[in-house]
Amino acid sequence: MTPDYYLVLATILFTIGATGVLIRRNAIVLFMCIELMLNAANLALVTFSRINGSLDGQIISFFVMVVAAAEVVIGLAIIMSIFRTRRSASVDDANLLKY
Amino acid sequence: MEQTVEFAPATGVLSLIWLLVAIPLASAAVLLLLGRRADKWGHWLGVLSVAASFVLGLVFFANLAGLESGSRSAELSLWEFIAVGKLQVDFGLLFDPLSGVFVLLITGVGSLIHLYAVGYMEHDPGRRRFFGYFNLFVAAMLLLVLGNNYVMLYFGWEGVGLASYLLISFWYTRPSAATAGKKAFLMNRVGDAGLAIGIFIMFATLGTTDYGAVFNGLSGLSATTVLVLGLLLLIGACGKSGQFPLQAWLPDAMEGPTPVSALIHAATMVTAGVYLIARSNPVYTANETLQLVTVAVGAITLLMGCIIGAAKDDIKRVLAWSTVSQIGYMFLGVGLGGGAYALAIIHLLAHGFFKANMFLGAGSVMHGMHDQVDIRRFGALSKHMKITWLTFATGWLAIIGIPPLSGYFSKEPIIAAAFEREVAWEAWVFGLAALLGAGLTAFYMTRLFVLTFHGPARWTEDNQHPHESPLIMTIPLILLAIGSVAAGWLMSTSVADWLTPVFGAEQAEPHGVLSHTMITILSLVVTVIGAGLAWSLFRRGTALEPQPAGVVVTAARRNLYTDAFNEAVFERPGIYLTRALVFLDNKGVDGVVNGIAAAVGGGSGRLRRLQTGFVRSYALSMLTGAMLVVGAFIAIQLGWLV
Amino acid sequence: MSDFPFLSILTLLPLVGAAVVAFIPRSKAELAKLVALVWSLVVLALSIFMWAAFAVDGDRFQFHESYPWIPAWGANFTFAADGIALVMLMLIAILFPVVILASWHDVDQSKRSAPAYFALLLTFEFTMIGVFAAADVFLFYVFFEVMLIPMYFIIGSFGSGQKQYAAVKFFLYSLVGGLFMLAAVIGLWVVGGRTFDFAELAQGAGSLDTNTARWLFLGFFVAFAIKAPFFPFHTWLPDSGGAAPAGAAALLVGVMDKVGTFGILRYCLSLFPEASRWFAPAALTLAVIGIIYAALLAVGQNDLKRLVSYTSIAHFGFIGIGIFAFTTQAGTGAVLYMVNHGLATGLLFIVVGMFVARRGSALVSDFGGAGKLVPVLAGVLFFAGLASLALPGTAPFVSEFLVLIGTFSTHKGFAVVATLGIILAAAYVLWMIQRTTQGTLNPALTEVPAMSKDITLREKVVVAPLIALLLVLGFYPKPVTDVINPAVQATLQDVGTTDPAPTAVADGKVGG
């Protein structure tokens, strides 16, 4: 069983995640798509770790998980407060920070 | 120049010559710094300080005379002024026969004029300030003639320019006075720039600015260098002495109080140019062309001064143009070289007496006539101002050269010397110019004298009652009148002998195109003709209003269009150039700077629009960026690039 | 040579003072002013001690100190002073107390905090001392940029007129120059042996590739030409000088701009000798154009502070030709000019500030006949003007004379044109004097109550030391020239030029 399939799976997951970020407006969905991309990256890292016979990739994937967890905490809090003030979770509505 | 110039170091009493400068300078500082606290006694301090300098000057002069004739000089270095590399300039003084004569003139005539000013300025609230400036002038002028190198000379040179500016614009609330002061300073600075470049040449070629070293090194310079050097010094001299083409400021300088005109713009400062050329006589003797140019400047100026002076109606301006003209004679003298150097100095001293005398006389007239200056509105004043009339008469007779008054002994020899030029056409041209000048001088001075003191009274009631000035003003007048009468024959031989160490011994008399007796007769004849003509024309007074006149008189009234020329060629283009440059700087140079800033700002304004605020479009651009990077990596891996 | 760490203490002292002043509450503004004044006087006292400890005949660089900073780059806190830096440090130490006292009431009317203003002034003193005391190219660069910050706030917060425009222009223009210099500093580090130490770099200066050295020279030169400023990089100065408070403007042209000319002397000449000689004709041309051009512009100004700024640009032209003439006289004259110009233009700016504070306007046309109302102040303005036009007896004459006479022996044409500048100098000064203090009294002036108040005691204390120094150095400049001269000679040795012998002597026609 070659590790290539894992890479293909990771690519597909990443693409789904990226597409989701680009086309969806709901902040929660966006968030889940980002998680999807992060996990796709994790999968790729672990796979490469296996291919190269080195532990570096796996260690980095732990870092990614920690970062993702922290990001979820802060991101959800932000989304919650935006939803409370604006009664909307659409990212397109939150466009005050421009030019 | 085969003989070397050497100055003996100052010894004994002569090592105190710095006091000459220091006393008036200290007095000026006290007067200007103490302010109103010194109002009550300030003018007396001013008079005393100059008088003290005069007494000291006499002592030093006597000491100098007591030395052997070969070593009659005293050089004194006070401190190192500038010492950088090869440039070594000391704050040094030199008291030799030439500077000694000048010191006596400056402090002697200066003391009298200071005394006179005590009375003249009595009712002026700025009298203390006036004496402060007056003392400053005396100090600067003494430094000018006492310096032992060209930098010291320049130091005093600009110092007298400053004092002259301050005194011309003394009544600074009058716009005309302020403008006249500025004009004087600016035209002087043109001359100063010439003098400065001359000094640069000395350093670049000879590595020194000391008189002795420069004169001794002249033989090593090329003729062109000497010519350029001399011309530059001549420009400086023209600026200070009001000679053509830098003469325009001097008549305007009459905006200052009359004692100023007497001391600065007649007796002393304006003769600084003559001093410069006389001091630099080895330079001028070394080059024929240089002498010719100097003589030409003198001749042009003396005629110009006469012609314009004859057309003016303002008593002080007539005297001012007369000064221009008389200094022209002095330039003629120093340009002729040889024995004529001493003649020019003698004329300078005599002129110092009679012109100061006449200026103060004019001041006395103005004092009695409620500051009226128009000679058409005087007349018959001889009855009301006896002393002024008599003293003015001596000045008048002296300047037109009636024997045995001083002008006869000083001016006539210069005319004779002009006829003795070696080249025949030069002798004729300059000799006749000087002769013609003598006739014109007689004409315009007689006109001035007659219109002021004789003929019918043309002053009206609102001029009040003409009256004689107080004693404090008339005593200096009397003393100066005695000088005007007696100075001529006292000086004519003794001063020439006295100055021999400076100018060298007089060469054997070259034979002129006319005999000396002939010239004497001729000059007396033209003088009598000029004076007689003026007397007969103006005996019965003149019209009160300007009369229509021919081309020559109109031109003369307008200063021979020299002012118009200056305005058209320098002033107006200068103003336009300035305006154009201000525009260019704001719109052009700064425009480029601001243009770049605006371009950056504008470009950023466009780019800013990319920041839409839509998170997902940012995400798209990030993705695109990431894909580009990955694409580039792949391309490199596959060898598409490179 | 003394072992006392003069330079580092001198540098840090004003910074500490700034921190102290900044923490004084606004309500105690008078206390803040007093502390700032006393602090700057302490700096002055220390500088006087340093001057006394400087051995005129000693090494070129004295008071050398070095502390490690970023070992990986070879950057150190290295301080050392030669005669040129010493006189500039002295000038700074003298000018700051004077300016602080002159600015005493400048902030009272505004809504801004007085302690902040005086803290900024002290911060500025810190950066100025640092930039002249640094003997490490990187340290110099850092100070070169940092000094913009306090001045930016001084102009932008406490200025007048188009102050924000002026402050931004000042900051950006200088920063652009600084970036050129940063590139050159890095380049120098790479090619010059990976060190920032000035002494080491100067030693290796001869081994640089000609082309590289010329490019690096340009990088430094552009920064310094903007800072000085030389034509045509000068347009920020009239804006800044016109907008800054008068005291700060005095510092701006009196001290800060000298960093440009000082930088050229210290860094361009010593580090890139061949390039300096190669660029000299171009630099001389720019300088001479600046003299004439700025003088003409000064004649045409209607704003007193802008006018003084333009006169400064003309004076910087003189300093420029002095530096690039490569003779001892011209070089010494240029450095002396830097000192004298600081005193003279500083005085001029301060006096103009006194007029502006009374009138509430800097426009020449708003004055006229003011000498009638404030005769003593008008007299001081006139004296400052005389010093500015380099009248003999005032200090600038000596420096201008040295510059011109030194330049004449190598570059006759440039010197002659520059000499014409002294005529224009008389024109702009006297024209300014005439329009402000002479002539008939402008009736609008009598309606301004402050205009009838002549010079106050505080103002007398402010101008007296400057006037005294200008006069003393005008008659006896030797103590200063003796300090400057060896440093200039060492610099010219770096450049590899020697004074020409007087031509007649060189021809052997006259004994030397």
Image (tube, grey):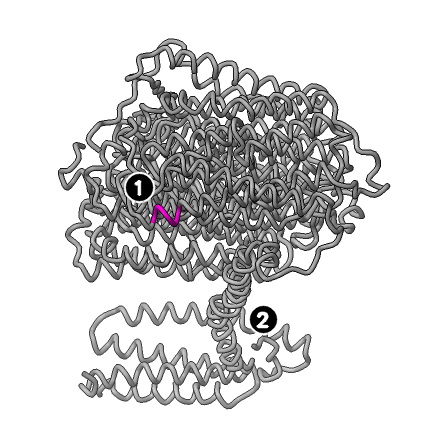
**Residue B505, quarter of the rendered image:** top left
Question: From the viewer's perspective, is B147 left or right of C506?
Answer: right
Tag 2 residue: A77
**Residue labelled with disc 1:** C68
The x and y percentages for residue C43 are 48, 31
Q: Where's the N terminus of chain A, which quadrant?
A: bottom left
Q: Secondary structure at mark 2?
A: helix
Q: Using the image as rendered, state which of residue C265 and residue B441 is in the foreground.
A: B441
Give the alpha-carbon distance from disc 2 to disc 1, as whole Å. Answer: 46 Å
Q: Inspect this view and state whether residue B350 appears.
A: yes
**What amino acid is found at the position of numbered circle 1 in the picture?**
Pro
Q: Residues within 10 Å of mark 1 (few under 14, many from 20)?
A: few
Rendered location of residue B34, percent (x, y): 65, 24
B448 or C300: nearer the viewer: B448
Q: Is residue B359 left or right of residue B466?
A: left
Count of picture labels: 2
The quadrant in which residue B380 appears is top right
Q: Could you say which is closer to the camera, residue C8 or residue B291?
A: B291
Query: The residue marked by circle 1 belongs to what chain?
Result: C
Is residue B528 on the magenta stretch?
A: no
Query: Split into 4 quadrants, where in the image is the C terminus of chain A?
Result: bottom right
Inspect this view and state whether residue C64 appears. no
Q: Amino acid at mark 2?
A: Ala
Which residue is at 29% across, 39% downward? B202
Q: Is residue B577 left or right of residue C461?
A: left
Residue at x 66%, y 19% (from the top left corner): B44
Q: Please state the extent of the stretch shown in magenta in the rendering.
A: B426-430
Give coordinates of residue B406: x percent, y percent: 51, 28
Q: Do the residues at pointers 2 and 1 share their chain? A: no
Q: Chain of mark 2?
A: A
